[in-house]
Structures are given as C-alpha cells and as structure tokens.
Image (cartoon, rainbow, N blue to C red):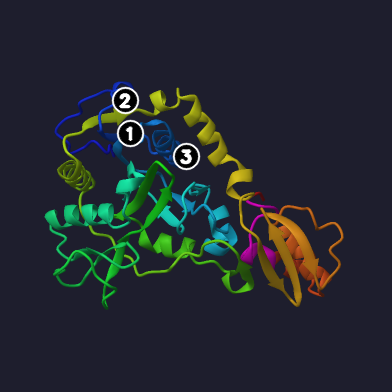
Amino acid sequence: MSPSRGLRRTTHSFASLLSSHKPTQIYLSLSNSPHLNLSLEHHLFQTLPATTRTLLLYINTPSLILGRNQNPWLETHHPLLLRSPQIQLLRRRSGGGTVFHDEGNVNYSVTVPTGEFNRDTHALLIARALRKLGVHGAAVNKRHDIVVLPTPAAEEKVDDPPGSRKVSGSAYKLTRLRSYHHGTMLLSTNLDRVRKLLRSPSKNLIEARGVASVPSPVTNIGVDTGDFIAAAVEEFMQLYGDAGVAEVEEEEVQEIENVRKGIEELRSMEWVYGQTPRFSIALLGAEVVADKGVVREVVGVDGDGLVGRRFGGEVVERVLVRSGMGEEEARKWAGDMVGGREWGME
C-alpha cells in the first residue's frame, strides 16, 4: 500500500524537495524494501541541513530488524527465521531492541536538530494522532513506547498501568548536530508470527554484551493504514508548520550512490552477523566465546579447528560431539537451537 494514500497533496518531487532547503520536509516512500528504506533514512539524516526537520514514512515487507548492538541468536528464533525465506534479517544503524516489520506495520522516522531533541516529543505526536483516530487509550509510557490502555487515557504520559499493551516501539540515533527517533506502528501485523520469531530457543544459554530487547505485551490498533499516515502527517505539520511533501519512488532512490552503498552494507553478512557484540554460549560443560560473530575461544573441550571460524550450528555441533554427545543428536540440537552452519548460511 502506498504511504501517500489518504494525503491531499504532494508539493515537490523527491529531487526538488531534497534541494529545496525547506525547513520542514515530509517523505513518503513508495518502496517496500527494508534495505532501501533504512538506507534512505540514513541518507536523509546524513545529507540534509542540520536545521531541517524531517518526517519519513514507509512500509516494509516481512523483516526482523536488529538493533545496532544486538545478537541475532539471542534476539530471534534464528532456526525458524532461516526456515522462513520470505522474512529478511537486518541490523539497523540505531540502538534499541529487535522489531518485526510487515505490511501491517507503518514505520515513521523523525529527524530534528539535536538541540530540540527529546525522546517523548514525537512519541506524543504519534499518540495524539491515534487519539484523533479514535484510539482514546493511546499514551506514552516511561520507556517512551506508545501503548494503548484498556480505558481512555487521562494523560498523554503514563507509567505502565495493568492491561496496557505496546503498539509502537522506538529507537534513536543522536549526533552532535542532528538526531532521529524512529518507530513502528502495529496496525494489522501478524502478531502470532511476531511472537514466534522473537522467542530465542537458546536464550537461556547465551550471555551477551550489547542491548537486550525488553519483552512487552503487544496489540494491533486496527486503524486504516492511509488514515494513520494522514493523521501522523497532520500532527507533524501542526507541530513544525507547513512542510514540503514528496513521494519517493524506488528507482530514483537507487540512483543515489550513498543509498546504493547503504543497501549493499545492510545486505552483507559482515554487517548483519559480523557486528554482533561479544557473547558466550554454554554447551554441556563447555563454552564457546565469540566476538564480531567469530569464535575467539573454546573452553572445556579441544578448540582445535574452531577458533577463528564464524559462529553457527557447525561450531556448536562439533563442541557438543567433543563434549560426549552423539553426532546425530548434536547436529539436531545445533539445528534446533542455533540454526545455520555458519552465521545465516545453511
């Protein structure tokens, strides 16, 4: 579905808005590629003037998006993910937890000068948009997530009252001049698939550095996609004034060299797996320590031929066999708990 559905007008082409120097700009991506949309976001963040306030809205095909400092084996059901080729795994450039995107989920990204940045400002903006659409329980909790309360919210900012359910998670990137807040909005996402994909079978075996996701009860808000996008745009304009609005075609974004390079980086195994912070996994009295997705140490059994290899099911299988488990059982266990022979490759 086009993110521009429900809007009354666009004012610029993509190229003309980029070069317009308008202080407030809104971009509506017509692409459903998660790699392209995250690279477009990064390009706008890096290249627009520091004083520009921007809103980017986009919808992605099914994908799991890791935070910058997260572990794919800890944050996802990695074996199930590898058995689901229609779902892509990405690592974004901002922090925060792992989120699921699909066509029932609208993503928003707001960039402002760092001096104006506040973690609640744009979450409250989106909550106001939801209230105007009839979601009267919409509010922002103390973790800056947008939640829906079981009864109409008396205040926009709340703690975590019983019965509240998360409908939008947030992540941030702050630099000296510009900062952004981007988030998800659950409209009609397949929540059963979300729960399964975000439940790691090896969670209790892994100790990791980096950022852990905070599990929360979630729900869909059931609002029409076009109505939500139009309401978000209206609230953004009320906060920052009249804006230039442009639709963004996939073909014209791919003509930008920096975006092409960004897509290539996000697609690379070295970025998705090779940026994993240091972690260890306990295996039958043995332990494997990995950093940047590569085995650095094996404790408790002979690590010959394993140190220096990419972490994955094959390393786990060999450690289990050297710890006394039968080969067939070890292969099945590694496949069920870790998945992939090395990194995300079978």
- Mark 3 nearby-residue class (10 Å; few <14, some 14–19, many ≥20): many
| In this rendering, position of residue 168 left or right of residue 208 | left
Magenta-drawn segment: 333-344
Which quadrant does the N terminus fall into? top left
Label 3 and label 2: CA atoms lie apart by 19 Å
x%, y% of residue 196? 46, 64
Regarding residue 102, the answer to whether it shows in the image is yes
Q: Earlier in the sequence, mark 3 or mark 2?
A: 2
Position of residue 206 relative to residue 175, above or below, is below
Residue type of the residue flagged with mark 1: Leu
Label 3 and label 1: CA atoms lie apart by 13 Å
x%, y% of residue 269? 62, 44
Q: Earlier in the sequence, mark 1 or mark 2?
A: 2
Helix, strand or loop for disc 3: helix
Q: Residue at x 16, y 43 (%)?
A: 234
Residue behind mark 2: 14
Q: How many marks?
A: 3
Residue behind mark 1: 30
Residue type of the residue flagged with mark 2: Phe
- Mark 1 nearby-residue class (10 Å; few <14, some 14–19, many ≥20): many
In magenta stretch: residue 1: no
| In this rendering, position of residue 97 left or right of residue 343 | left
Q: Residue at x 33, y 26 (%)?
A: 18
Residue type of the residue flagged with mark 3: His
Between label 3 and label 2, give the one nearer the viewer: 2
- Mark 2 nearby-residue class (10 Å; few <14, some 14–19, many ≥20): many
Q: Residue at x 20, y 26 (%)?
A: 11
Helix, strand or loop for disc 2: helix
Label 1 and label 2: CA atoms lie apart by 11 Å
| In this rendering, position of residue 19 left or right of residue 148 | right
Give the label on residue 119, or none: none
Residue behind mark 3: 35
